[in-house]
Amino acid sequence: MSRDRISGFAVRAAACAAVLVLLSTTAGSQEAPRGAAFAPRFGVVDVYVESDEPLAAWQFELEERAGRMQVVGIEGGEAAAYEEPPYYDREAVQAGRADRIIVASFSTRPPAALPSGRTRIATVHVRLTGAAPPDYDLNLVAAGAPDGRPIDAEISLETRNGR
C-alpha cells in the first residue's frame, strides 16, 4: 500500500469515528430526558379500615393494575393493636418479587382495646416504575370481630411520595 492510500484511509476512518461520536452524543442527549421520566421512584400507601365494630382481624390485597409496583416494605398501623408490622411474604419482598401483596393481622386484645371507626392498619412502601401515576387495586379480603365473626368494613388508601 502506498503512503497516500494509508493516509487517505486514516482520514476516512477518523471522519467515520467523528460522525459516530457525534451521532451517539446526539442520540444519548435525546434519550436522557426520556429515561429520566421513567426513573424508579418510591411511594407510600397508607391503608385504612373503617368499621363501627371493634376490628380484631383483617386481611387485604394490594396491587398496581399495570404491574408498575414493587413492594419494598410494610409497617404497622396507628392503633396499639396493630402497631407491629402485619403478616406478609417477607421473603418475596426481600427478593424483589412482590408486585402484589396480601397483608393480614389479628389481635387478641379485649374489644375495648381494639380500634373502631377509621384507623390506619398498615403502611406499604413501594417502588414505582413508569411515568404514569400508579393505579392501585385494594381489596378487603376479610375483617373480623373479637368473637371471630365477619364484620362490615370499608377499606381505603391514601398515597404519599416516598424518599
Image: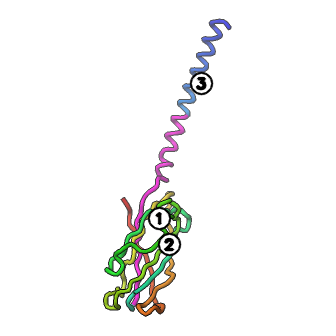
Q: Position of residue 76 (x, y in %)?
A: 37, 73
Q: What distance separates the C-alpha of mark 3 from that of mark 1?
A: 47 Å
Q: What distance separates the C-alpha of mark 3 from that of mark 2?
A: 53 Å
- Crowding near pointer 3: few (<14 within 10 Å), some, many (20+)? few
- Crowding near pointer 1: few (<14 within 10 Å), some, many (20+)? many
The residue drawn where x is 36% and y is 59% is: 163
Q: Which residue matches tag 2?
A: 62
Residue that lies at the very extreme toward the top in this rendered image: 2
Q: Nearer the viewer, residue 13 or 121?
A: 121
> In the rendered view, would you say 24 is above or below 60?
above
Helix, strand, or loop for circle 1? strand
Helix, strand, or loop for circle 2? strand
Give, as a three-letter code, the residue at label 1. Val
Give, as a three-letter code, the residue at label 2. Leu
Q: Which residue matches tag 1?
A: 71
Q: Which residue matches tag 3?
A: 16
Asked if marks 2 and 1 touch (Cβ < 8 Å), the reply is yes
> In the rendered view, would you say 102 is above or below 92?
below
Q: Which residues are magenta?
A: 24-51
